């Protein structure tokens, strides 16, 4: 049995809203071309045993880069022996999801694809070789790119059971933001109690997670840097001891006024560009700076002399590579995040909630830098939660 989902023609205004600089094609070009507005079929084959036969679910599809996503009916497929079918309740919206839909991310999935790197939900069906979870279990998953849908099929090794007392919505914030924060602070920077941590893009999902973990788990002191007074106030409410609005002047000078000439021990930078360079110059003797992203859009070059003069270390962190290269560390840290959440030691911040069909609004919310904390999308019940911003 085969089912076909046909591409729908989206309103032309979406192209202007989601990607203002992208050229719009004429109606005649669209009608015969095979883009988002064409009738090119997306073929999905369903059949065989299990829940897949005859089932359909809605998913957000990227059929053409730099274009809005379309919500389509997709045919389910049978689960393989090592796989699990999950009813998705919440899916995080990360800046990486927007980049991959523009073709600007490190990973480039084949078109058409469904974005969405992290989700939470309940198990619908398990493959014959799966013994780690069962039908009805509450789980979070790290899916690569296929979480923005009403259901998701995933390898059982990339699912974690949600402990009792942890809500599905909060659990779904953990895989990207909190694993990044813990990896950056503990594994890469080796942050110690009492040290001073400077975090940039502090009101984004990762920034707030860094504040949460540094303050409440590692007992470090946090200076939160963000681009507006409102975002600085949010960072302060989430536990930062000091705040800096780097849209109003030099970050380096502001940090110097707070800590003196000694500098900060650790920097977690998600902005890049001049903010990264000023943060690097704010480090203390044997300080450590960890690069976790480039929300400002500019990748700075590291002046090697600065590393030498203060014996400082500059390092990167790409959380997804740990899943591929060192899965035991990735799994241990995600399990720790779930435990911290169950114990009440961390308090994930939910910035906004969107329905599945509002995925383009969620992306726009992030692009226009309106988001603070995590944005969530909800399929039938899916929520988008959005992340990084300057």
Image (cartoon, rainbow, N blue to C red):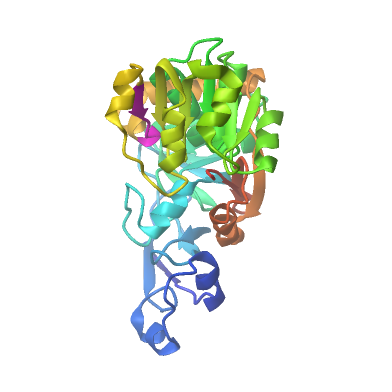
- Tell whether position 316 is magenta: yes
- The image shows residue 316, relative to residue 114, as above or below, that is above
**Relative to 191, is 244 on the left or the right?**
right
Which residue is farthest top?
A: 193
* Front one among 228 and 135: 228
Q: Quadrant of residue 24?
A: bottom left
The residue located at (56%, 10%) in the rendering is 194
Q: Is residue 134 visible?
A: no
| Residue 279 belongs to the span the image colors magenta | no
Kindly identify the residue that appears in the image at 52 percent across and 53 percent down: 149
Which residue range is magenta in the image?
313-320
Residue 283 at x, y percent in the picture? 44, 22
Front-most of 94 and 246? 246
Given residues 166 and 52, the one toward you in this image is: 166
What's the residue at 33%, 16% (across, down)? 311
Query: Which residue extends farthest bottom?
Result: 28
In the picture, the quarter occupied by the N terminus is bottom left
Q: Residue at x 50, y 58 (%)?
A: 59
């Amino acid at each position: 049995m085969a089912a076909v989902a046909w591409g729908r023609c989206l309103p032309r205004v979406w192209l202007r809203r989601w990607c203002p600089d992208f050229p719009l094609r004429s109606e005649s070009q669209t009608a015969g071309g095979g883009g988002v507005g064409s009738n090119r079929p997306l073929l999905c084959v369903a059949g065989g045993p299990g829940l897949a036969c005859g089932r359909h679910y809605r998913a957000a599809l990227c059929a053409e880069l730099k274009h809005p996503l379309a919500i389509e009916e997709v045919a389910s497929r049978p689960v393989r022996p090592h796989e699990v079918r999950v009813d998705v309740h919440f899916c995080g919206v990360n800046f990486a999801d927007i980049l991959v839909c523009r073709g600007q991310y490190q990973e480039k999935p084949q078109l058409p694809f469904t974005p969405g790197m992290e989700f939470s939900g309940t198990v619908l069906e398990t493959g014959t070789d799966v013994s780690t979870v069962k039908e009805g279990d509450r789980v979070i998953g790290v899916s690569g790119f296929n979480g923005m849908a009403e259901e998701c099929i995933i390898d059982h090794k990339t699912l974690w059971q949600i402990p009792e007392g942890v809500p599905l919505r909060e659990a779904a914030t953990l895989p990207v933001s909190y694993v990044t924060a813990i990896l950056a602070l503990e594994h890469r920077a080796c942050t110690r109690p009492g040290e001073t941590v400077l975090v940039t893009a502090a009101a984004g999902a990762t920034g707030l997670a860094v504040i949460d973990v540094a303050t409440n788990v590692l007992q470090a002191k946090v200076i939160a840097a963000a681009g507006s007074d409102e975002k600085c106030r949010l960072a302060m409410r989430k536990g930062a001891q000091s705040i800096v609005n780097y849209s109003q002047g030099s970050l380096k000078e502001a940090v110097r006024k707070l800590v003196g000439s000694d500098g900060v021990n650790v920097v977690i930078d998600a902005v890049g560009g001049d903010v990264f360079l000023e943060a690097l110059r704010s480090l203390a003797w044997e300080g450590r700076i960890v690069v976790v992203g480039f929300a400002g859009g500019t990748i700075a070059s590291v002046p090697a002399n600065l590393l030498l003069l203060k014996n400082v270390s500059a390092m990167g962190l790409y959380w997804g590579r740990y899943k591929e290269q060192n899965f035991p560390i990735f799994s241990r840290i995600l399990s720790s995040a779930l435990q911290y959440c169950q114990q009440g030691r961390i308090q994930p911040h939910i910035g906004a909630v969107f329905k599945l069909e509002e995925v383009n609004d969620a992306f726009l919310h992030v692009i226009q830098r309106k988001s603070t904390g995590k944005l969530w999308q909800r399929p039938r019940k899916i929520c988008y939660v959005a992340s990084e911003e300057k």
